[in-house]
Image (cartoon, grey):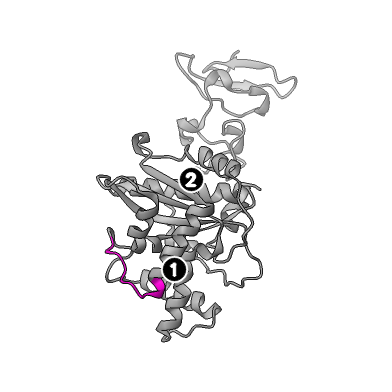
Amino acid sequence: MDVYEAVTSRRAVRGFTDQPVSREVLERVLSAAAWSPSGSNLQPWRVYVMTGAPLAELKKRAGERVAARDAWDEREYEMYPSALKSPYRERRSAFGAQRYGALGVAREDWEARQRAASANWQCFGAPAALFCYIDRDMEPPQWADLGMFLQTVMLLLREEGLHSCPQMAWSVYRKTVAEVLSPPDGLILYCGMSIGYEDVTVGYVRTGRAPIEETVTFVEDPVPQWPAVCPRRLPPGAAAVARCRPHRRPVEHHAEADLPPAAAVDESTYSAGDRLPVKGNQPSGRRRLHAAGNTRQRVGPTGVP
């Protein structure tokens, strides 16, 4: 799988089979992902990988909280700005309509939306999960480093034939995660990530992306405008954009920058009567090429060789 295919085939999968994911594969992916870029090589991520009984225990505890309608844990960071402006507001609304529309959930059916969201805390049935922490002393640039690391992980998972779903939803059950993982107090849970083999029987709608014109601006050099000069007087390989007139023009008409060095002039391309550039301390006067044999001969001011 090439990189382009990995990028375009990666998506947030919300339905996994129970086929186990080997530790060997996970170690290979995470070892390679360690080469992700980070400012001054801080590598600010701290990752926990859960499978088997520990993950089953976490799913059990999270499920009990959902069933009890337990209040969410206070967030340690805001997932989204409190007031999204355009065009982000419209993009988020479009995502919600596509996501819940594919499940047959109406926009106003809050209970059904909550039930659909609760699948997050069961990792959508995935047999492996990753939890990514960051030191609470880190700043926004280091949080950006987490994003690059996690994207690298997800692309490498595609190379292994696996899918994933990054989930900030775990941040609101961070205390339950901490009960199972016992991370140091100085860490903040950024997100979880479900990992496994896709259950192809689960339907989905692939969310679109904004056209490149909305998110990318190209700032480029203007297209160069070549001077209208004789093609024969351009440097070798340069594109000629204009033809010379039949009559001879004075040398001064041609910009010196457009002429090759005197030593590089191939005089065999000049016909009789053409004036060659005069450089350095060469004697004044004209130099002609005889049409017969292209033999060069200097002609003085009086016309006598």
Seen from this angle, which residue lies furthest left?
A: 137
Disc 2 to disc 1: CB gap under 8 Å: no
Marking on residue 63 = 1
- Residue 135 visible, this angle: yes
Tell me where residue 46 appears, x and y as whole percent: 39, 44
- Relative depth, front residue between 243 and 66: 66
What residue appears at the point 28 percent right and 59 percent down from the top-left corner?
Answer: 77
Q: Main secondary structure of the magenta part?
A: loop
Query: 140 or 17, which lies in front?
Result: 17
Dot placed on the residue nearer the N-terminal end, 2 or 1: 1
Magenta region includes residue 71? yes
Give the residue type at disc 2: Pro
Tell me the SS state at disc 1. Answer: helix
Q: Position of residue 290 (x, y in %)?
A: 69, 21
Q: Which mark is residue 224?
A: 2
Image-based side of 247 in relation to 212, left or right: right
> Residue at the right extreme?
292
Q: Residues within 10 Å of mark 1 (few under 14, many from 20)?
A: some
Which residues lie in the magenta part?
66-75
